[in-house]
Each structure stands twice: as C-alpha cells, then as structure tokens.
C-alpha cells in the first residue's frame, strides 16, 4: 500500500497472537493510506482555507478593434452567482467592451468550486469520501467556522488570486451578481480592515480595494440592513438556513446514487432539482417569459452540477444568506455603490428601494420586466446601468461609510417600507375581466369611389379598391369592474393574413375564456409593467390568446392588436391619466425633464392614396393643393401600372406644392418594388423633374421583404435598402420593417431600440 503500486500480501500464520498482530498492522496501514488519499492535496488540487492561495481562472473581455498594446489603467471585476461561472457575464461583457472607455480592463473570474477553478478535492477523492460517509453534512456541524466554502474564505481566495496569480494590484470597480455580490461586499470589508489577507497592505495606494472602489451589487443580499432587527436571528432566517442545508444534503445524497444508477436517471434528478430551484417566485416566471433562455440556463446548471456537485452543494450549505456577516453594508461607501434588481424580483427590488431611500447607496436601478436572472434576461439594460454608473464623473470622492440610522431616518425608512409594500404587494395587480364585442362596417372614400392600393407588397396595387371597412369593437373590463378598455379588430386584405370570420372565431374563444366562472384562471397584470412598453403587454396578450385555446401559429394579428388596445386603456385608467401621459410617465427616462410641449399636438402627414386624381387635370391638382393644411404630404406610389406611372404621379403632385409654403413631400411604396423597379422609379422621376431630389424627403419601404434562406432579418433588409440609397441617391424610411423587427423582439422596445442603434447609431448621415 505504501509503495503506491498493486501488491500481493502473503502471511503465514504461526499462532493466533501473531495472526492478530498481522491483521492489526494491515488495518493500520490501510487506514493511513486511505486517510492520506482522501485528504492530501496534489498539484492539480487545492485545500481552500482562510489562508491558502488558489489560482482562480479569469476571463478578459476585449474589443477586437483595439490594439493589444492599449493602456488599460482601470479594472472592472465581474463575479458570478451560485452554480454559475465566469462565462455568466459574457452577454453583459460583450456590451461593456463597446460602451466603456478603452482604459477599462474588464475581467470575470471563476469562484472556488465553480467553473474551471481547481478542485478542492479531486473526483476520485470525492468518490472515496462519499463511500466512507465523510461528505455527509450534519445538523450540528459548524461549517462556517471551518472556512471550507464560507463567504470570507471565497472572498480571500479571489483577492489573493487576483494579486498573486494575475498581477492585478487594484480594482476600480466590482460588479457582483447574487452570491457574487455578497462576496464583493466581503472583499470590500476584508480589504478595508486588512483582516489577514496574507500580504497585508499598509496604505490605501497599494490596496486591492479602497474606499474609491465602486461597488455594483445585482440582486445581492447585503446582510441585516439597519431597518431590520439585526440583533437577533429571526425564525425566517432559521427556516432559510434549514431549507438551504436540506437542499445541499439532497444534492450530496444524490452523489451516492451516481455510482449505482444510469447517468440518464441522474441527469433527470438534476433537471428536476434545477427546475424546482428556478421555479421560485424570485425568478418571476422566467420559464414563461423567456422559454429559450430558461432552457439554456437549465442545461448549463445541470452540466455544472454533474461536474462539481459536491463543491456546489458545500457552497450552498455554508453560504445561505442568513449566514452572511450582518454588517457588510456598513463598510460600503454610499456614493460609490450602485444596487440593481429586477422589478419582478420582489425581495431584492424591495431591498433596493429601501436602501436607496435610507441613503445607503448612491442609486438604485430597477430593471423592468426582469426577475432575479438579470444577466440572462436583460444583459443590455444591465450593461447600460453599469456604464452609466462607471462613467458618472459627478460621483464625489466621498470617503464616508454607511451611517447608523437616526430617528429621523427611521421614520423615512418606515414610510418607504409602507410605500414599497403597497407597490410590491400582489393586491395592485389588475385582473382581466369579461370581454364583449360587436361588429361594425363603415364606408370609406367619397363620391362612390373607394380607396385604392391599400396593403403591403403585391396588395398595394391601384386596381385593388376598398369601399368599406368592417370589423369589431371589443370592450374588456377589469376584474373589479372599475375600468373598461376599448379596442378595434379590423382585418384588412393585403395587410392581415386572417379573414373577418377567422378573427370573429378567435374573439369568441377569448370571450368564452374570460367569461369562465373560475376567476383565478383569468390573468392579471401590473399597470406599470404594461405601460413601460418592455414586452410585458405582448406576452400578456399572447398568454390570453393561447389560454383561450388558439394555436400559437395562428394568432390573428388584428385580434392581438385589439386586445392590446383594450389592456393599455385599462392600465392607463388605473393610473388616473390619459394614455399618452401614462405611457410617458412610465417610459420617460428618470431625471430627464419633460417640456411643456411634450404632450402637444403631433404633426401628421396629409395622405394621397394610390389613384387619387390619377386622371385629373392640372387645375384639379392646384385646387386640391390649396385645400391641404398639413406641413407634409405623403403620396402612395408603387401601385400604378408601371414605375414610370408612379414617378409621373409623384411629379404631378410635387409641382403645385412647390410654392411659398414649401411643404415636405414624401412617398410610400409599401414594399411593392424589387430593386430594378425601384431604381426605374427614381430615374423616371428625375427625368420628369430634375429638382425632385430637393423636394422629396424619402421613399418609405421601397423594396420587397428581403428573405435569406426563407428567413427575414432587419440586417438583410437594411443592406438591400442601403444599396437602393447608394445607387438611387434617394433616402429611404422604415415602416413595415419596424413591425417585423418588433415581432422578432417580442415587442420589447428596449431591444428594438438597441438593434436600431447598432444599425444606424454610428453613422449620422445614414438614411
């Protein structure tokens, strides 16, 4: 055994006493060997304790357009949460490198027991310890004092590895998500108090973290804040610790079974464990809101647990939030601290509001329509919040730490707690009530002539005449009957795929669903979420339609639009404001003043439909032009017999308008042309009036829908439109493309804006 090689031991027994002596020696040697094996540390492993260094892997986020020799004078550290790894920050990191100044060195790190961090015990050692029941957690075991995976142990491991393994001498900012935020707080406390950091720093200039280091905490538990009773451990704290330790024990117990059951059965257990963990209210129905992101996250967590179950379970056992040091919040510099939480994460958004009101942090940022999985759900918004905080030059060089709460502050906090309780309580949710609808039909056009060329693409032809418009007016009541929202459902040939009969069928299904006796089945919503225009409205309406038994592949756009109108109306009524003001109040950036003209009259186009005055004399044009009171005029083109006819129609309208009033002239093609036809239109217009380019502002959607491999994207559409602009020298505008982009982004207007900024924001003169 001691040689480390397989051996055959042969003993020839002479008498009983000698036999006993030999067996005792064999037993003693075997125990020594096994003890050494299950506890020793090899070069590939480490023994994490309060004073032992561990080389933790890091990842740098860089911009490929920046030379490697660029000077990086500032460092931002990103710390992941439980069950995660350094790649958890990849989506946010990709945004940060684009938006932060090049002086920032952006790195993420694997925490002990996670990702590619060295094993505390090798898989073989873990297997032997499990077989010998050495891995079991006991109710009375004091794992916090043992320091194996405590918050302080991991915080010190991160600090030591950054300094000794990666040559990072100072941190200008730390962003920690969930468990990572708690470790960031502990790092801050340990560095500022110089508690046994292996290489004690004597002055602020040489410290890894100083009072000038900015802290960004994302959904992190700061300990016992001053408005809590932090002198005693509450029963809820005890329950949370017991719950976390039972979960840790469950994970460890499953490790025993892996040696006896098929791998598929183990993965099935891990899948259920992770799904149950992420089914907590903390995550805000993540599976329903982002099924694809949820699926990917579940897969990543299962893989992490299958590889590092023992250590991840140990972290959960030792780092249950109530086991945090209770006063880490006292060591932060308020002016240098940002707290972020999702609006659907009731626990941590509540903490954020209270902490901000008590003056404990510089700012609290609430991410709309997000739960606890901030890095997965809203990486762009998280990056934006981080960049704004890190670039804010107004943050003073304040060196004070969080203060104790005075009686006056306590009164403020109590007011905030009451105010936030009202905001966070489920009671403000508005339940969707019953729905009714009636049909209508109206005549359009005049003098027995209808409107021609209504629709998109091939439907925008002059021979297509619409003489009447029909549909349905719907009304939806709130569950308490205090508000009624109205919407219109009017399927239009050439624009909608569904017929009026199909729309009526779906409306009947919705009416039946919302009329059910069991009111608990009817959905509810928060007005502030709906009015924030962040995708919540679209998801709510889609859930109503699907719950009504309508197949997701056949959802009628006109029905969806009508129900959205009604829900928006109910939401604005609950706020006591007209819809435009209610939308602005919830979507307008905080801190940006609203001018007195914000809610003034909006300028609108005059509209000349296809074929209007097509055969009229110039005198008719002049007479019609005099009646126009609009500041701009849009003319429908691309629906006549040929591009030449379209061009001549445009020119005929432009000539009487080009008078003293100098109206803006615009054209709308509704995606009816291919590129050769669009360029023919431009050439014919120039031939008919050489100054047309000085009069015409743009052509709206001149090209057909661009599909590559039968799939449309905004990038492919804009590439084709740019080609039109470069050749034809006439600017274009988007309309139908924005509708398609909204559908691709599930009507999350923040994501829509980000996509458009990436396409157009870097080129001021872009059409």
Image (tube, helix red, strand yellow):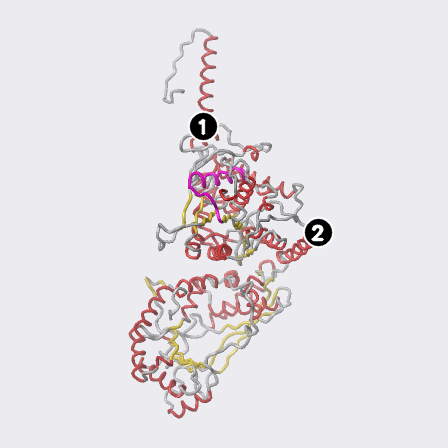
Locate the N terminus and report the quarter of the image it occupies. Answer: top left
Provide the residue designation for mark 2.
407
Provide the residue designation for mark 1.
40
104 with respect to 719 (left or right)? right
Q: Nearer the viewer, residue 229 or 3?
A: 229
The residue at 32%/62% (across/down) is: 709
- Vertically, is 3 above or below 256? above
The residue at 44%/86% (across/down) is: 661
Is 162 a magenta residue? yes
Q: Which of 721 and 443 is in front in this view?
A: 721
Residue 530 picture location, percent across and down: 55, 63
Tally the numbered discs.
2
**Which quadrant holds residue 127?**
top left
Q: Which of marks 1 and 2 is in front?
A: 2
Is 616 a magenta residue? no
Residue 443 picture location, percent across and down: 48, 83
Label the magenta part by its dominant secondary structure.
helix
**Which stretch appears magenta?**
150-172
Residue 103 picture location, percent across and down: 42, 52
The residue at 57%/60% (across/down) is: 523
Q: Would residue 112 be seen by someone viewing this image from the given angle?
A: yes
- Vertically, is 117 above or below 12? below
234 with respect to 201 (left or right)? right
| SS of the residue under disc 1 | loop
Confirm or deny contact between disc 1 and disc 2 (CB under 8 A).
no
Q: Would residue 256 be seen by someone viewing this image from the given angle?
A: no
- The dot on residue 463 is none
In the displayed orientation, state which residue is furthest to the bottom.
619
3D distance between C-alphas at marks 1 and 2? 55 Å
Q: Nearer the viewer, residue 75 or 116?
A: 75
| SS of the residue under disc 2 | helix
């Amino acid at each position: 055994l001691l040689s480390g090689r397989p051996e055959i031991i042969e003993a020839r027994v002479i008498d009983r006493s000698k036999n006993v002596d030999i067996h005792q020696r064999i037993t003693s040697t075997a125990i020594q060997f096994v003890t050494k094996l299950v506890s020793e540390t090899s070069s590939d492993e480490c023994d994490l304790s309060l004073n032992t260094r561990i080389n933790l892997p890091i990842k740098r986020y860089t911009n490929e357009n920046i030379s490697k020799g660029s000077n990086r004078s500032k460092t931002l550290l990103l710390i992941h949460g439980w069950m995660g790894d350094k790649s958890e920050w990849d989506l946010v990191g990709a945004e940060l490198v684009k938006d932060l100044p090049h002086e920032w060195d952006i790195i993420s790190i694997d925490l002990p027991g996670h990702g590619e961090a060295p094993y505390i015990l090798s898989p073989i050692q873990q297997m032997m310890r499990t077989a010998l029941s050495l891995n079991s957690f006991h109710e009375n075991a004091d794992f916090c004092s043992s320091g194996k995976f405590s918050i302080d142990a991991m915080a010190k491991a991160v600090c030591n590895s950054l300094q000794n393994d990666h040559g990072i001498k100072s941190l200008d900012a730390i962003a920690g998500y969930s468990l990572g935020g708690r470790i960031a707080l502990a790092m801050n406390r340990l560095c500022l108090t110089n508690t046994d950091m292996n290489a004690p720093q004597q002055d602020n200039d040489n410290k890894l973290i100083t009072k000038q280091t900015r802290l960004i905490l994302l959904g992190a538990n700061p300990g016992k804040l001053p408005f809590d009773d932090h002198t005693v451990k509450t029963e809820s704290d005890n329950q949370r610790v017991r719950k976390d330790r039972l979960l840790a024990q469950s994970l460890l117990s499953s490790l025993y079974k892996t040696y006896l059951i098929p791998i598929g059965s183990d993965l099935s257990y891990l899948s259920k464990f992770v799904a149950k963990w992420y089914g907590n209210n903390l995550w805000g129905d993540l599976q329903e809101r982002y099924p694809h992101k949820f699926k990917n996250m579940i897969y990543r967590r299962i893989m992490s647990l299958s590889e590092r179950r023992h250590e991840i379970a140990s972290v959960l056992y030792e780092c249950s939030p109530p086991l945090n040091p209770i006063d880490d919040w006292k060591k932060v510099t308020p002016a240098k601290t940002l707290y972020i939480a999702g609006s659907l994460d009731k626990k941590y958004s509540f903490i954020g509001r209270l902490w901000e009101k008590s003056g404990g942090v510089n700012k609290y940022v609430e991410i709309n329509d997000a739960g606890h999985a901030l890095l997965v759900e809203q990486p762009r918004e998280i990056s934006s919040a981080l960049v704004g905080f890190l670039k804010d030059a107004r943050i003073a060089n304040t060196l004070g730490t969080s203060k104790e709460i005075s009686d006056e502050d306590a009164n403020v906090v109590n007011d905030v707690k009451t105010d936030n309780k009202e905001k966070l309580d489920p009671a403000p949710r508005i339940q969707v009530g019953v729905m009714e609808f009636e049909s209508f039909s109206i005549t359009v056009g005049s003098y027995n002539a209808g409107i021609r060329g209504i629709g998109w693409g091939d439907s925008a032809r002059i021979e297509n005449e619409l003489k009447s418009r029909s549909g349905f007016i719907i009304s939806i009541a709130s569950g308490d009957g205090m508000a009624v929202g109205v919407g219109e459902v009017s399927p239009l040939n050439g624009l909608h795929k569904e017929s009026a009969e199909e729309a009526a069928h779906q409306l009947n299904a919705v009416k039946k669903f919302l009329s059910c006796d069991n009111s608990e089945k009817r959905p509810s919503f928060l007005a502030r979420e709906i009015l924030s225009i962040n995708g919540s409205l679209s998801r709510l309406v889609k859930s109503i339609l699907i719950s009504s038994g309508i197949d997701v592949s056949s959802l009628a756009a006109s029905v969806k639009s009508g129900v959205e109108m009604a829900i928006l109306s109910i939401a604005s009524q609950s706020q006591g404001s007209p819809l435009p003001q209610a939308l602005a109040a919830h979507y307008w950036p905080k801190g940006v003043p609203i001018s007195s003209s914000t809610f003034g009259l909006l300028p609108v186009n005059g509209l000349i439909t296809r074929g209007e005055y097509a055969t009229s004399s110039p005198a008719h044009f002049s007479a019609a032009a005099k009646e126009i009171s609009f500041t701009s005029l849009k003319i429908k083109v691309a629906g006549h017999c040929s591009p030449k006819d379209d061009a001549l129609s445009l020119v005929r309208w432009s000539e009487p308008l080009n008078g003293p009033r100098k109206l803006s002239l615009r054209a709308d093609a509704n995606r009816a042309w291919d590129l050769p036809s669009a360029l023919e239109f431009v050439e014919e217009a120039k031939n008919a009036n050489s100054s047309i380019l000085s009069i015409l502002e743009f052509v709206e959607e001149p090209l057909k829908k661009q599909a590559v491999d039968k799939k449309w994207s905004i990038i492919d559409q804009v590439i084709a439109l740019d080609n039109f602009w470069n050749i034809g020298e006439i600017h274009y505008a988007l309309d139908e493309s924005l509708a398609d982009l909204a559908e691709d982004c599930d009507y999350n207007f923040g994501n829509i804006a980000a996509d458009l900024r990436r396409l157009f924001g870097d080129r001021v003169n872009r059409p």
